[in-house]
Amino acid sequence: MKYCSDCGQSIVVQVPEGDHRERYVCAACDVVHYQNPNMVVGTIPLHHDEQGQPKILLAKRGIEPRLGYWTLPAGFLENGETSSEGAVRETLEETCAVVENVAMYRVLNVARTNQIHIFFRADLPLADFTTTPESTEVELFAFEDIPWRQLAFPTVHKTLEDFIDEYHQGQFTAAMFDIDHHSWKVLDI
Ligand SMILES: [Zn+2]
């Protein structure tokens, strides 16, 4: 950040009085421009086909970052919406799919990229979806067909792995993990 979004004057980096971290501070109007983590919210849309086989809806990213890789539908939470509302909205925007019965499943702290990802379990009653400006392909995957090596983000990998494990166990447990963005490893917490 170089210029103040309030008054347009130059920004300096300094520790404001009473604070303990360096911040972007406007030298002219003294406004402190705080930078805080972003929330990414998404769903695990689960559909059962006519044979009763469980399938998960994935989208192939049509935009950077990770263009061309598969992801669960997810995106940045907007001001004024709850995390589950944001997850349902992102699912609709990226895949045109309408999900219901959303339930919190995974909170994943990605401290190195200043993000927190929240994924919700969700039912996808109708196999009704299509590509969008954000997704070049949208497809239902049987568990054994998940493209593990072409997933966009470690948080998607961890969430899908846990979801499929717990689906087979017959019980879902909401949980939180810390993710090392570089190694895609779950950190011990
Ligand atoms: Zn200013």
Image (spheres, grey):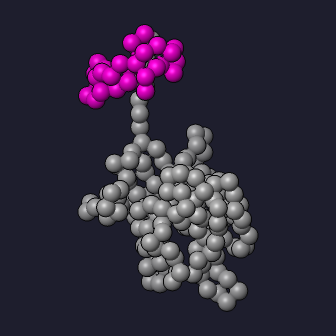
Residue 6 point in image, percent of width and height: 52, 18
Q: Main secondary structure of the magenta part?
A: loop
Q: Quadrant of the C terminus?
A: bottom left
Residue 29 point in image, percent of width and height: 44, 11
Residue 1 point in image, percent of width and height: 43, 27
Residue occupying image coordinates x 31% and y 64%: 185
Residue occupying image coordinates x 47% and y 78%: 164
71 w.r.t. 85: above or below: below
163 w.r.t. 76: above or below: below
Q: Examine the image and state in which quarter residue 70 appears.
A: bottom right
Q: Is residue 107 magenta?
A: no
Whether residue 92 appears in this view of the structure is no
Residues 185 and 89: in front is 185
Q: Residue furthest bottom?
A: 51
The reply, left or right, for residue 133 in relation to residue 9 is right
Residue 8 point in image, percent of width and height: 51, 15
Q: Examine the image and state in which quarter residue 78 appears.
A: top right
Q: Residue furthest front?
A: 68
Whether residue 18 appears in this view of the structure is yes
93 w.r.t. 123: above or below: above
Residues in magenta, as a range: 1-28
Residues 13 and 178: in front is 13
Residue occupying image coordinates x 40% and y 57%: 108
Q: Examine the image and state in which quarter residue 125 appears.
A: bottom right
Q: How many marks?
A: 0
Residues 154 and 149: in front is 149
Residue occupying image coordinates x 43% and y 51%: 116
